[in-house]
Image (cartoon, grey):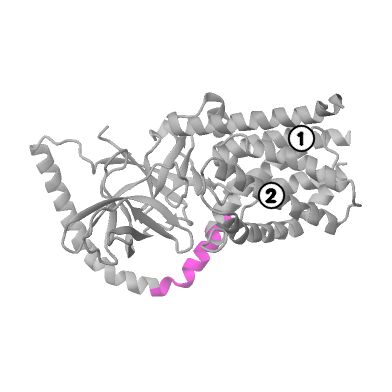
Amino acid sequence: MQKSFFNKKLVIVLIALIISFLLIAFSIAVRNNRKAPTFVQQIGNDAAGIVDRVVSYPLDGAKNATSSFFNLMNTYQENQQLKKQVDSLAAKDAENQTLRKENQQLKAQLKLSKSLTNYDQVTAYVLTRTPSTWQNQVTINKGSLAGIKKGDSVLSRKGIVGRITEVNNSNSKVELISTNNDSANRFAVQVTSKSGDVINGLITNYDTNSGDLVMGQVTSKKKIEKGTKVVTSGMGGSTPKGLLVGTVEKVSDDDYGLPSKIYIKPAADLDDLSFVTIAVRTDD
Amino acid sequence: MRTEKMNYYFPIGLFLAMFLDGGLTQVFAKQMFTNTMAMESRLVLLFIVMAVCYGNVEHLVMWSAIVGLFYDMFYTGILGVFTMILPLMVYVTKYMFQFFTRSFIVVLLIYLIDITIVTFLFFWANSLVDFTNATITDLIGRTLGPTLIYNLAWFVVLFLPLEHFFETNY
């Protein structure tokens, strides 16, 4: 009887389970505490990244071909709409440049070389996406060699998409803002109310059913209009100030009358990323 | 002589399947992850199941553990999940396969059972480390059904080529 408890297979299964749990615990610790993963992990990830570039090349080519075909279909309509916008854009651009220059001069006078809105841009393309429902994560083709640090914000053309969670030499992982990971590093955001007051909060959650981001930790009772822009506040971490997150979709009150949750429609399309920009904050 | 060839072909195909999983997910992300459904690509499992049923591969458990480790390292960053699940699936498939004679339908059913087990185990591992707060109802409604359909489609497409691949190199 005693022998059947200690048969070889059972021992192997138990040891494998224990190793597996140790590995999981170890990687969570690495993820939460260390700037970069271990040496062995980095080598494996870099090698996998290089091979992945070769494999995904034809796939990306096929995708580009189909999407350019569909783009061609509605080019005429789009062209007419864009023509109207272009005229006003030139004027805005000129104004923007003047303001930027003035801002620089004023900063120089104040000897304020670093502020929350300054950041360097690194452009990268998306290598692959994690085939998982539970982690909204993509891998990009730039890593610590390009100056990327853990915790940097990642933007698409339209707005913020996520945050860097793991940095290897030549690739890094981006946790998208739509994650429901309880231990994820949250974005501090702000929104301006009807009366002009700034309301601060955090992106606390993502509503999978509606595709909205949920802004929580709001303590103000001020009225917020639908369609107001929500931007990062630059507080508490490595996110620059003033990056667009999305627009207010609806405000829901809790039982005590405080607007506890603000639902935000993300500006960026989180499921259609091919190129991203990493904002490396320069003031630290 | 022929099985020796398999020693090279099998790992190459296995890693190709692994990278295709991520590549396809990236390309079709808009279709695969919507508000109501989420599909998880598991071509690597299809390759392993076909190898168990039709192939004569040495060190199958070892290779599935290695590819599982890379899967964890490159995709999720949490080691030890697929490193365990994939070798386990080799055993489970081998065990189930004893009771049947192999045919398209049998392998298909075994594959669907495998996908279900993997989806549940992967969900369990993810909720264990607090990566998700979804409930089992969310899992069944949003992920499991679409995942089964998606992988079933790939199975139908890839069955004959893979069968041919494993049988010529038997």
> In this view of the protein, which residue sits in the foreground, A68 or B137?
B137
Q: Residue A70: x percent and y percent? A: 51, 68
Residue A168 appears anywhere in the view: no
Name the residue tied to disc 2.
B43
Please give left or right for residue A220 compared with residue A148 in the image: left
Residue A48, quarter of the rendered image: top right
Q: Amino acid at mark 1?
A: Val
> In this view of the protein, which residue sits in the foreground, A97 or A26?
A26
Q: Amino acid at mark 2?
A: Leu
**Magenta-colored span:** A61-77
Name the residue tied to disc 1.
B61
Residue farthest to the left, as pictured: A109
Between label 2 and label 1, give the one nearer the viewer.
1
Please give left or right for residue B127 compared with residue B113 in the image: left
Q: Residue B89: x percent and y percent? A: 75, 43
Label 2 sits on a secondary structure element that is: helix
Question: Where's the C terminus of chain A, which quadrant?
Answer: top left
